[in-house]
Each structure stands twice: as C-alpha cells, then as structure tokens.
Image: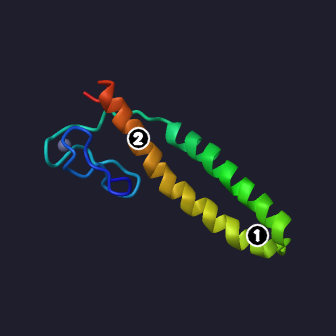
C-alpha cells in the first residue's frame, strides 16, 4: 500500500504514472486527479523529517565512532537522497488521500 498506492476512490487503480508523477485519472473508476493540489507540503514534510533524522544519526555516529569525513559523506548523502525520494511519495500520497476525503479532489 505505501509503496504502491492506489486510487483513493476505488482503491484498485494505480495512483502514480511514475515514481512521483500522478496518473491523469484512475484507469479503474475514472476518478480524475487533475485537481490535486498538495503544493510544497510533501517537500516540507520531507525536509523536516529527513533533515532531523540525518542530523540525529550523523551526530550519533560522529560521537560514537568518529569516522573520517569521507565516510560521513558516503553514509549520509545516499541516506538523505533515498529517504527523501521514498518519503516524498509517502507524504504526497497521504496528502492526496486527505484532499480526497475532504472532498476537494472532485
Ligand atoms: Zn479509482
């Protein structure tokens, strides 16, 4: 469900055309997604959550192991990119479901 979100109306058709691009409408029930307007909400949530997690983990690793800087870069750049791409889809889906339930996707 989280990584393969479906249409909020019928829960059958795929919600996304690509990883972050919505389908124009549901292929099962025809629900249009063109009024979707989550704006920068998912990006803001990702910045807050991933920024907090990456900082917390980097500080913990630094205090516990004192690794060289190149190892920090090797750890936190992929972590930040991966977590951001994953959570962007999760937060975007959550906001689209919320918008649908509040009747603003009609
Ligand atoms: Zn549908």
**Where, by quadrant of the figure, is residue 59 drawn?**
bottom right
Q: Residue at x 44, y 51 (%)?
A: 89
- 87 over 92 or under it: above or below: below
- Note whether ligand 1 is within 8 Å of mark 1: no
**Where, by quadrant of the figure, is residue 45 drawn?**
top right
The Cα atoms of the two marked residues, 1 and 2, are separated by 32 Å
Q: Which quarter of the rendered image does ligand 1 occupy?
A: top left
Quick one: 78 or 18, which is closer to the camera? 78
Q: Name the residue beneath numbered marker 1.
A: 72
| Residue 54 place in picture, x, y as percent | 69, 56
Q: Looking at the figure, which quarter contains the C terminus?
A: top left
Circle on res. 23: none
Category of crowding for the residue at label 2, using alpha-carbon neighbours closer than 10 angstroms: few (below 14), some (14–19), many (at least 20): some
| Residue 101 place in picture, x, y as percent | 31, 29
Q: Which residue is drawn at 56% across and 58% down?
A: 83
Side of 74 where 70 appears, left or right: right
Q: Note whether residue 101 is visible.
A: yes
Q: Name the residue beneath numbered marker 2.
A: 94
| Residue 39 place in picture, x, y as percent | 48, 35
- 104 over 56 or under it: above or below: above
């Amino acid at each position: 469900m989280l990584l393969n979100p479906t249409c909020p109306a019928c829960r059958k058709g795929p919600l996304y055309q690509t990883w972050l691009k919505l389908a124009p409408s549901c292929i099962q029930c025809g629900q249009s997604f063109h009024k979707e307007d989550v704006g920068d909400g998912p990006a803001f949530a990702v910045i807050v959550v991933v920024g907090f997690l990456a900082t917390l983990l980097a500080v913990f690793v630094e205090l516990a192991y004192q690794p060289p800087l190149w190892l920090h870069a090797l750890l936190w750049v992929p972590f930040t990119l991966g977590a951001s791409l994953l959570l962007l889809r999760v937060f975007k889906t959550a906001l689209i479901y919320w918008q649908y339930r509040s009747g603003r996707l009609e």
